[in-house]
Image: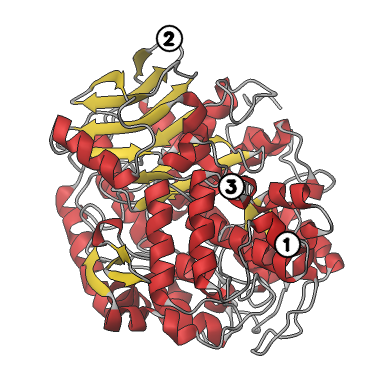
Amino acid sequence: MARSFNGKILHVDLTRGETAIEEPPEAFYRTYGGGSAMGTYYLLRDLPRGADPLGPQNILTFMTGPITGLPVSGQSRLCINALSPLSGGIGDSQAGGFAPAALKFAGFDGIVVKGASARPVYLFIDAGKAELLDAAGLWGKPTAEVDRLLEEKHGKVEVIQIGPAGEKQARLAAIMNMHNRANARTGVGAVMGPKQLKAVVVSGKLKLQAAEPQALSRQHKEGTRNIEEIPDMKGIGINGTADVVPFQNSIGSLPSFNYNEGAFEKYLDLSGERMRETILKERDTCYACTVRCKRVVETEFHGQKVEPTYGGPEYETLATFGSYCGVSDLSAVSLCNQLCNAYGLDTIGTGATIAFAMECFVKGLLTAADTGGLELRFGDADAMVEMVRQIGERRGLGDILAEGSERAARTIGRGAEECLITCKGTEAPAHMPQAKRSLGLIYAVNPFGADHQSSEHDPLYEEGVGELYLKRLASLGLTTPQPPGSMTDEKIRYAYRTQCFYSAMDTYSLCQFVFGPSWELYGPVETAEILSAGTGWDVTVDEILEVGERRLNMMRAFNARQGFTRKDDTLPRKFFKPLQGAGPTAGVAWKEEELERVKDVYYRLAGWDAATGNPTPRKLEELQLGWIDR
């Protein structure tokens, strides 16, 4: 077994109150890598057909990667998978922090949770042992208070938990660690609620060892130098992910007023530079990472304090609670971020769902009678804050919106679906496919819905891109940058190849701000070298791409079992309507025939059936997945 692994997966049966330890062979780790490929493996193997996402048969997996816990930037990531309460397909979400490394230090590479407890419990893991303990005294409490109570009882521990939103089975619920890092997307937090699993509490002091510690140390030092030498990385360190706000606005890719416009007049008020000049208190980081992109803010909004303990807003949060909702008040956005972290809510899904409700209100599809008298209009920061509280507590209109915007639209009726920005039930993040054309394809075909971290974005493979980026992309066989705004077959190949690479990063549980195909600290070649140094395997770029391709095919096969076909690979109606307002993308829209054309090219590249969009038996056999029961 590679020394960077523990070689142990913890299995938890909540119904019986039992735990067991599995010790898979090294070949299993080499094939599935870790992360969401390994999590999806257990779902494909053990989840019964027809399972209810909010029922006891759903399976929840927590997986780390092959180098999680080693001294190199970007490795402390946790991947969580389940049958998604939002889409009914594969659920997938990643987060950073210290908890992923702590799980490895506690003696396990991952956890598989089945069944449902008859009472609230939490899983306590300490030095290779696990037990279920009573959580009645933690139920209903905000995440920071739960962290405090558990540390008072157990000492220094890392806590992976749901907040009140997850307890109430809100489909927008997240799973939090450090009460400011979130496995937020696809509704995974809602799965823990009906299982009555409040938290996973981890304590451990096991030391992991790289196969080649000196080689790993050299790469870590090289990456630290790259922070200063690569402009995008330096900007993310100094200004956080919010550093991209001005660029996004300049290309018409800053979603505004519920994706009706691509630019926001007051974008500078939401920028990372403005945050740094006003409310930023300090920069935080994840285990062993030198980038320090995490924001910590302190401010107040109308007498409501925003505490540093809940961190601060990232780019997506600034957009969804900012430009999506027509709000430019940085303190109001920061308060919404804090409330989401305290309740345990996905900031992307929650902000986007509120923006959806605002458009419904403006169009008369919702009235004051529906909102309890709340004037839910674009630009009203107070109404936005109140609606986050209602969603977190599942009261008033918030009880409907907590189901996510797609289900809320069905409840509201009256044409509310025209206001949606969802793909496979998941609200679209803050990168617009009207400006980044290949991203529209990925939003449509991605197994778990619209996601901005499932492929590289168009500007990195368009004419005029920098030499370093081209060199790194060349290692993926991408050597011909395309005209800006194009959607050529080569651009589609770029989308697919980088999707496979990003898929591997979520399999190896690596941060995509550190490991990536272009602007990150480490390119594909360096990523292969770091994985080799950590595990002792002779990892190549080709193997990385194959691992990523295997994960995509596993997820598509899972969705096929759930009844997904080509028709589910689509974009919301709103994306086929010309954008309003000003900016470079005003008047721009997707065309349905264009989407169908690019899907044909994509399926051919992936080796999938063009009629269904699903993996063929031949492709599954090619990727050692012939065992999957479709």
Residue 189, disc: none
User: Which kind of residue does numbered mark 3 sit on?
Assistant: Ala
Residue 474, can we see it? no
Who is closer to the viewer here, 339 or 72? 339
Q: Check contact, mark 2 vs mark 3: CB within 8 A.
A: no
Crowdedness near tag 1: few (<14), some (14–19) or many (≥20) residues, C-alpha within 10 Å: some
Residue at 14% of width from left, 37% of height from top?
Answer: 207
Closest to the camera, between mark 1 and mark 2, is 1
User: Which badge, 2 or 3, is on the more N-terminal residue?
Assistant: 2
User: Which badge, 1 or 3, is on the more N-terminal residue?
Assistant: 1
Crowdedness near tag 3: few (<14), some (14–19) or many (≥20) residues, C-alpha within 10 Å: many
Residue 49 vertical placement versus 171 (above, below): above
Residue 367, disc: 1
User: Which kind of residue does numbered mark 1 sit on?
Assistant: Thr
Image position, residue 583 (x, y; %): 64, 89
User: Which badge, 1 or 2, is on the more N-terminal residue?
Assistant: 2
CA gap between label 1 and label 3 equals 18 Å
Residue at 55% of width from left, 53% of height from top?
Answer: 500
Residue at 26% of width from left, 25% of height from top?
Answer: 124
CA gap between label 1 and label 2 equals 48 Å
The quarter of the picture where the C terminus appears is top right
User: Element type at marker 3?
Assistant: loop
Image position, residue 499 (x, y; %): 56, 57
Task: Specify whether 364 is left or right of 4.
Answer: right
Residue 620, can we see it? yes
* Disc 3 target residue: 402
* Disc 2 target residue: 16
The quadrant holding residue 535 is top left
Who is closer to the viewer here, 478 or 377? 377
